[in-house]
Amino acid sequence: MFIINPILKWSYKDIWDYLKDLDAVMYGTRDYCCLYNNGYTSLGDKLTTNKNILLCQFIKVQNGQPEYKYAPAYFLHNVNPKHERLSRVSTPIPKYIFEGIVSKGKQFARTLGYPTANIQYYLTLNTNLTTYLDCNPNGSIYPAFVALEYHHNGKMCVYRSGKYWDYIGMCYIRSNIIEVNIFDLDLNKYPSLYGKNIHIMIFDKIRDNIECESIENLKECLKEDEKVIKQFFTFFNN
């Protein structure tokens, strides 16, 4: 006797394509838990199940408290299969999401080996938000997820490639200035970012801006920041 499992090699996308098939939606023949529509990708007990950080799409601050919006589980197509399990591990809580267009800056960071994308953002970084972010008047450094070439329809971000947060990086915020250095950017795909739509999800800051004694000292400081941020995102890369 042979036992055959026809879905043994199905991918995460295969499963959701089956569940979201038009006939299934119309006739209700393939039900699934409603929690999958609210940012969960893997379900266990209450103590070990969280919303998947990669599906966080919008953060609104009301009275100093963040309100989050998460996409459904089927938005997680074409990613590392391990990312489904981010619903079952403790991950950092995102602090805020900025959306904007990359503009040309002074390009000083490029001379340091850390080129940054300067962001013309759609949200005003007012005093209350700066306080909420715990941003130093001289600037602060934050770990960041980065998504490129995404559009906003007023409610949520609609992705093109099937992978929402493409890169990790180092975000610098001061007053009305937002810059991000994107780690391991695919320069063949993105030879220039000018004019590109960009989303940046930041987490709690790693440090405030400091005055360095020399250019070499500044480079060493940035190198250490990169090391700290990559360590911070270990959960994402494993």
Image: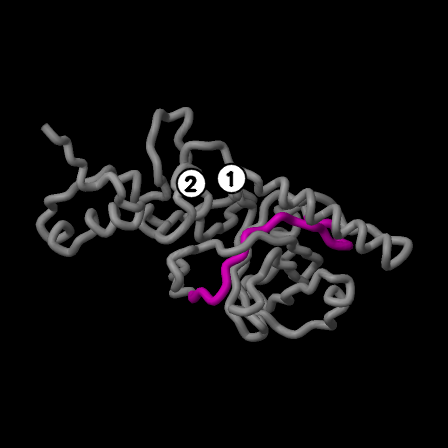
Residue indicated by mark 1: 238
Does 171 sit left or right of 222 as displayed?
left
Local SS, label 2 = helix
Label 2: few (<14), some or many (≥20) within 10 Å? few
When asked about the image quadrant of residue 85, the answer is top left
Q: Is residue 91 left or right of residue 36?
A: right
Is 137 one of the magenta-colored residues? yes
Which residue shows up at 30% across the image and 45% down it? 37
Q: Report the side of 226 relative to 30 (left or right).
A: right
* Spot occupied by residue 111 in the image (x, y as percentages of width and height): 77, 67
Query: Are the residues tagged 2 and 1 within 8 Å (C-beta)?
Result: yes
Residue 127 marker: none
Q: Which of 39 and 230 is in front in this view?
A: 230
Q: Give the range drawn in magenta.
A: 135-151
The location of residue 236, given as percent across then percent down, is 51, 43
Q: What residue type is labelled 1?
A: Asn
Disc nearer the start of the sequence (2/1): 2
Which amino acid type is shown beneath numbered disc 2?
A: Lys
Residue 226 at x, y = what percent?
69, 49
Alpha carbon distance from label 2 to label 1: 8 Å
Query: Which residue is denoted by mark 2 in the rendering?
Result: 82
Pointer 1 local density, CA inside 10 Å: few below 14, some 14–19, many at least 20: few
In this view, the residue in front, 176 or 30, is 30
Quadrant of the image containing the N terminus: top left
Q: Quadrant of residue 5?
A: top left
